[in-house]
Every structure is written in structure tokens, then in C-alpha cells.
Amino acid sequence: MARPPLLIPRPEGLYCPGGDFFIDPARPVARALITHGHSDHARPGHGAVMATRETLDIMAIRYGEDFTRSRHIADGAITIGGVTVSFHPAGHILGSAQIAVTGGGCRIVVSGDYARVPTPTCARFEPVPCDIFVTEATFALPVFRHPPPETEIARLLASVAAFPDRSHLIGAYALGKAQRLIAALRQAGWDAPIYIHGALHQLCDYHVAQGINLGDLRPATEGKKADFAGTIVIAPPSAFATAWAQRFPDPVIGFASGWMQVRARARQRGVELPLILSDHVDWPALTATITELDPAEVWITHGREDALMRWCEMTQRAARPLHLVGYEDDAE
Amino acid sequence: MSLTAFATLLERLAFTPQRLGKERLLADAFTRMPDPERGLMLAALTGDLKLRQVTPSLLRGLTEMRADAQLFSYSYDFVGDLAETIALIWPEGTRTDPPLSEVVHELATAPKTRLPALITARLDSLGPSERYAYLKLATGALRVGVSARLARTAFAAWANLPLPQVEEIWHALQPPYLDLFAWASGSPRPEAAARAPFRPVMLSTPTDLDQLSALDPADFAAEWKWDGIRIQAVSDGGTRRLYSRTGEDISTAFPDVVDLMAFDGTLDGELLVRRDDEIASFADLQQRLNRKTVTPAMLRSHPAGLRLYDVLIWNGQDLRDEPYDARRAVLAQAVATLNPRIDLSPDLPFATWDDLAALRLNPPAAVIEGVMIKRRDSPYLAGRMKGPWFKWKRDPHLIDAVLMYAQRGHGKRSGYYSDFTFGVWNGDDLVPVGKAYFGFTDAELKDLDRFVRTNTIERFGVVRSVARTKVVEVAFEGLNRSSRHKSGVAMRFPRINRIRDDKPAVEADHLSTLQAMLTN
Ligand SMILES: [Zn+2]
Ligand SMILES: [Zn+2]
């Protein structure tokens, strides 16, 4: 009799029959393992949740303490039913993990979202040898070769110097990208106060409490218009469409995202200063990771599956798209 | 200027929405760059560099030797711009930073058979944004929002020279404009050496009955304001050119008019489509304007001609310092010697401003936009100054429309919804009939912005669809038939005149009202 597969795609998400749990399910389930705190991966309402301590904290911050009935901190190798699971850093955002599921002599690594560019805001991606590597494909096109973050930060600082009378309003998603941006500015030596939108406070505070140095952060609510000349203000992109943006003097609108590599994307958003700053693997890092791990099979969760499928075909790797629903590939 | 500096400038220009911001960037480039690089940069931006046209299919073929054709096609689908896709997908090699002049020279002179090898070698040795700039240069489509007019304005401001003088010689100069930049640093003004140069045109300011009543009608002449394209027709020692009022050479679109220009001089007038005695609508003229090449059928169905307002130069004599009346006398004699498809815009007889107001209210043709009023003693001056020439337009058309969509503005309007799409009723549905992003006061903008934020019903990317409850009065100058718009009509210069919070949406105008305006 053939053993049931270790993981199978179901409408709710990726399911493990041996351990009776889902990984990053898009709908409420009895037992969920969560790779990281982004809302398309971590949803409220599951019966029990296993994740890293940081991911559990982040879910509580975003959804309230009652986001699940029981929390389990992932630590070391854990046996669930007939399988063993372990969490390994994914380098994407604070607390992000790849989940390795081992059973019946086979190991599958579900990488969630991952990045290989180091950042002070989270632990570096750890390559875990496996038979099946489950990967995202957010930036899986050969046109995505993200420049080093330092050159993008240098462009931002050059623009601040060139327009001392204007404020720089940079859009960055509240969880992960905002802190990655702030930390990169600090590494580049920008030690002036950075002003942040209210939606960023709690998450920035949490990063600081975890020992991540974000420097002098101030709410972007205090002060007169003129006080914001020459400053850097960080806000979730949705804030630019609100009256909130009107308080700043002739702002230079920027946006920190891997999508900014494509001009049309930048123009669509009305961006004057596109900053290519990503927390996902770009094409070279994605293909290098698969080459390095050299799994027997590649499964693709979300993004540009067709291009990654084509690359696997060209490099003679077995690959399949999972066609999972519920992941946003735009919210980067 | 190196290619890297050029690439950086392109990027900054493309992402700087404001005109003033673009002008600042150009001024900065003029200062920092040496000759001949800055002149080449300028010519590249305004589309005046004559390089070998590199075709998209050649570039596609070259790229498929460096990247998998299928991955390339997925990428092109996603990026949407060929030059950008190639710039991003091309494998990294060693990075060099050649001078712009070297690259331009190469693209201008290389034999066609050498182009593939040349382009490949360049792409192999450039970084991604340099590859982008290089490919845009090679395909001749920069699209960074720098018109020739903006470039001239930026140059004049930077060089601290009067814009009319810059415009007057610009068309005679060739890239890399060494004499132009020499003029900016104190050398004498270059001669307009080429034949048939453009002379800056004289423009009018708007007026109304209140303003006019302070003036003596006896000091002024009047004529119709024809709704065509204001042109300058220049014939100089056998060279004939037709310029728009901003100095763009539009001769190739109107060979029939150029054929008629058997004179020696510089004339100011209106370009019109004329069928026998009848002057056709502006929409007919636009059909001619939009064509790159003119077919014989088009020449037959949409024949163009000129109606003259003024004369600047006649048989070698510069008349610009003469008074208007004297110039018109010369013009009247001159016209008599020309083909009848070039005629004189007639003088309107009037004794009082009320006489003129009556004429203006009842013009003899639909293609009349109002009246022009010109001081009889005024010389022909470059530019727009208040006093010598006035335009007294027919009152704009007004309709009440319902706000449908809104989009955020740029620059100082960042954060405000300031681009509006409005519609009128067609049966029980609203159909969009135009877009407006000006006309309102600051207070009205705040009101509209607040309305959009609190009444959004749907979002499409950056566009918000709003509840169909806000009525605005839209003013516009004219209406054209349009097959590109769902409504079948296109407004000219629509703007939001005022907010009609006193009107419920059901009382907004119907499409039939606009359709009726089309037919008369
Ligand atoms: Zn994520
Ligand atoms: Zn994701």
C-alpha cells in the first residue's frame, strides 16, 4: 500500500495528513503552522497555532490576544503525529521561518517568503537540505535583479540633500519593510529623527523591544508643516491616499518595494522616487537557492510560476505549481 | 557627459512630474556638462538627434541570443516596455561608462550591417540603467516629458536670455548647439543662418466688456477669431515652412498649403480645412494633424488653406516695428497676389463695443471662437503682453455633470484628489464625457477632495469611483465627435467652473444636450 504524501495542496492551503495540520492556510483551520506574520500567511481564527515566538507576538499585536485558542512556540524538532517539524530562519521579516516537515524518509521545506540579503531586522536565511523545496515566486522573472540596498539608500539620502525644503515621504509596508528601511538608513549613518505614521508605532516598538536598533523614531503627527522640511517620513502606502499626506511641505513621494524596478509600476503609484528595496529573493537569489539546495523536486506556491517552471525545465529539475489561493504577491 | 550621467538625468526627468522640477534638472545639467555632451543631451531629449533607427525586431533578436526566448516573453509581458525589458534582462558584464558623444556618433554613423554587433557589444559592457538609456537613444523614444518648448524655456531661464530671442534662432541651429551655449556664456548671438526661420509670434490676453469699456474703440481694429491652428507661414528664398505658434515645423502634414506659399515673406494666420467657401470644423482639421503622412484621398476630402491675420516680413522688409494698420495695408495688397486658398481674415466694422458684442454673439460660422481686438498702432511684439491685442471669446459652453471618478494629483497637489472624471445621463446611466483637473479654487479643491474620500465606492488601482451624487458645472470651449470615447463626444479644454451642491444628480444634463451642440 502506498503511503499518503507528506504534504498535499488543499483549498484551505498546504495540508500534512501525517500530522493533521496546515501550513499558512488561507482559511481558519483546527491546527496551523505559520511561517511568518504577514497577513496573507498568518490569519486569525485558527484553533491552534504553532510559529516562532516573534510570529506569535506579531499575530497578537495585529489581531489581538485572542487570535487563536492555543499558541505553541516552535523550538527545535517537534513531533506531530507521525511527522517531525522544525523551524529555520527565512531572512524575510522578524520571526519569519521556513518549516521543515520530515516523515517516511522524506523532507519537505516550506520556505514561506524568504530573502537572502542580510538585514539587522531578522535572522539570516538558513539553507536546509531537503527532497522537496516549496518556494514562492514573487520576483521570479529574470528582469528582477535588485540592486544592493546600500545604493538605494544612497539615492534616497542624495535626494534629501538635493531638496532640503521638501520632506521625503516613503511608502513601506508596516511589518518588515518599514523596519528594514529604517535599519538600512541607520546603517548608512542617517541618525536624524525618522518620523513614522501611526500605523507603524506598535510594530516598530516591538522590533526595538527585541533588541533591534531603529534609532530616534518620532510620530509624524507633531509639528508644523515647515518642521518637516528635510526630514524622512515613513508611512504605509495606503496613507498617501489620505488627508494625512497634506501636512508635509511639497513632499517627494517615494516607495520602497522590489516592484519599483519596473518603471510602469512606479508611475502607476505616482512615485517620484522609486526605491528598489525588497524582502523577497530576486531572480538570481531564487535560482541560486534552488541550485544550492538541489532538491529532487521544486513546488511553487505563489507569484510568477510559469517563469520559474520554465527555468526548472531548462535546468532539468522536476517542478510543479501548487496553485494555492489567498497569497497576495503585490503587497511587497 | 557620460552615459551614466545621461541615464541618471533621464530617470530623474521621468519621475519628476512638475514642469518647474524638470526645468531645474535641465538647468543643472547645462551647468555641469561640457560641450558637446550637453548639446547632444538636449537634442536627444527633444527628438532632434538623427540616429539610425534601430528596430524593435532587431533588438528582440539580439536579446534572444542572450536570454531564453520564453523567459524574455514572460518578462516583456510583465514589464510592458521593450527597451526596459531588455535593459533589465540582459546579463551583467563589465561596466564601462562611455561619453554620450561617443555613443551618439557610433549610432549615427555605423553602417547598418554593423549595428547588431555594435549594439550587442555596448549592452555587454553597460549597467542596467545605462542599457536603458542606450536603448531609448537607439530607438529614439525617450518619453520623459520634455518638449522642445520646455527645453527652450529651461535654456532661456538658465542662460538668462529672453525667451523670444532664443525661440527665434533655435530652429536654425543644429545639434550639438555649440554656438547656442557660446551665446549663453557671452559670445554674440548666433545668426539665424538657416533659411525660413521661425519668428516668435504675438499673442493676446483675454478681455471682457467691463475691461473694454475703459478703452476707446476708435483705437482698435477687430476681426474674427477662427478656430483652427494658429500658424506662421514662411517662404524664404525658395525654402517654405509652416510652423505652429510654438515653432514646431508642421510642413510635412500640410503639403497642399506649402504648395500655395508662392511668396517671399513671413505671414501670421490660421490654418483651416476649407471646402470651397465653407470652413470645416476643428475636428476635420485634427484629422489632418494626426496623420504622419497625408494620403491623396485625405488631401481631396480635407483640403487645407490659410486665413491671414498679419505680416511680419515681406519681400525682405521686416515690418514688425510698423503699426498694425500699416502692416494690414501691406497684407491686403500681398494677399491679392496669392492663390485664393490663402485669404485675409476680414476687418469687422464697429463703432462701439456694444456693436462688437452683438457681432460676437452671432458669428456667421460655427468655427468662430470669438473676436480679436488689436490696437491700430501696435508693433508686432513677441510673446503675450496685456494691452496691444485682446481676445474676446464667445462665452464657454456650460453643462452640469456628475462626478464619477477621481485620481490624486502630483507635486503640490500630492495627497489631494484633483483629477476628476465626470459624466452626463444617457437614459438611466451616467456616461463619462470628460476629465478636468483645473478650474476650481483652492477651497473648492478641498471640498472635492473631502467628497472623494468620504464617498468612495470602489477602487481601481489609483482611481477611485465615487458615489454619483456630486454635481459640478463644467465649462468647455467646444465639442468634437469622437469614436475613441464611449460617449461619442470629446470636450475641448473642459474645466470645473463651480460646484453645484444646490443640484441633485438627477438634474444633471443629458448626453442629448451635448449631441445637439455637435450638430449646430
Ligand atoms: Zn511575507
Ligand atoms: Zn507572501
Image (cartoon, coloured by chain):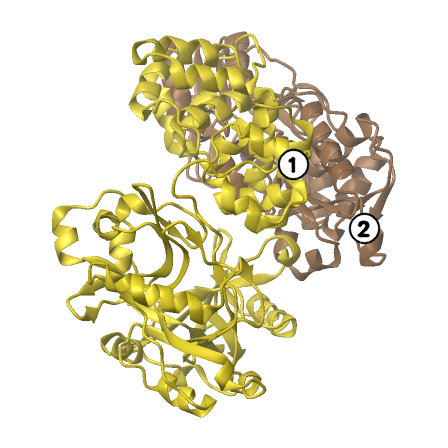
Chain colours: A brown, B yellow
* Quarter of the figure with the C terminus of chain A: top right
User: Can residue B502 be seen by looking at this rendering?
Assistant: yes
Three-letter residue code for mark 2: Phe
Are there few (<14), some (14-19), or many (20+) residues within 10 Å of tag 1?
A: some
Residue in the foreground of this view, choosing between B273 and B501: B273
Q: Is residue B358 left or right of residue A69?
A: left
Protein chain holding label 2: A
Could you say where residue A22 lies in the image, as x and y percent from the top left? Answer: 52, 33
Residue at 44% x, 14% y: name it: B106
Q: Residue at x 39, y 11 (%)?
A: B66
Amino acid at the residue labelled 1: Ala
- Say which element carries label 2: helix
Horizontally, residue B19 falls left or right of residue A179, namely left
Please say if A253 is above or below B333.
Answer: above
Does the beta carbon of the residue at mark 2 sit less than 8 Å from ligand 1?
Answer: no
Task: Evaluate if marks 1 and 2 touch, with contact meaning CB atoms under 8 Å apart.
Answer: no
Rendered-image quadrant of the N terminus of chain A: top left
Whether B365 is drawn above or below B298: the answer is below
Q: Position of residue A238 (x, y in %)?
A: 62, 51
Q: Which mark is residue A228?
A: 2
As helix, strand or loop, the secondary structure at mark 1 comes to helix
Residue A41 is labelled as none
The chain that hosts pointer 1 is B
Looking at the picture, tell me which residue is in the foreground, B475 or B173. Answer: B173
Quarter of the render that holds ligand 2: top right
Question: On the image, numbered disc 1 is attached to which residue?
Answer: B184
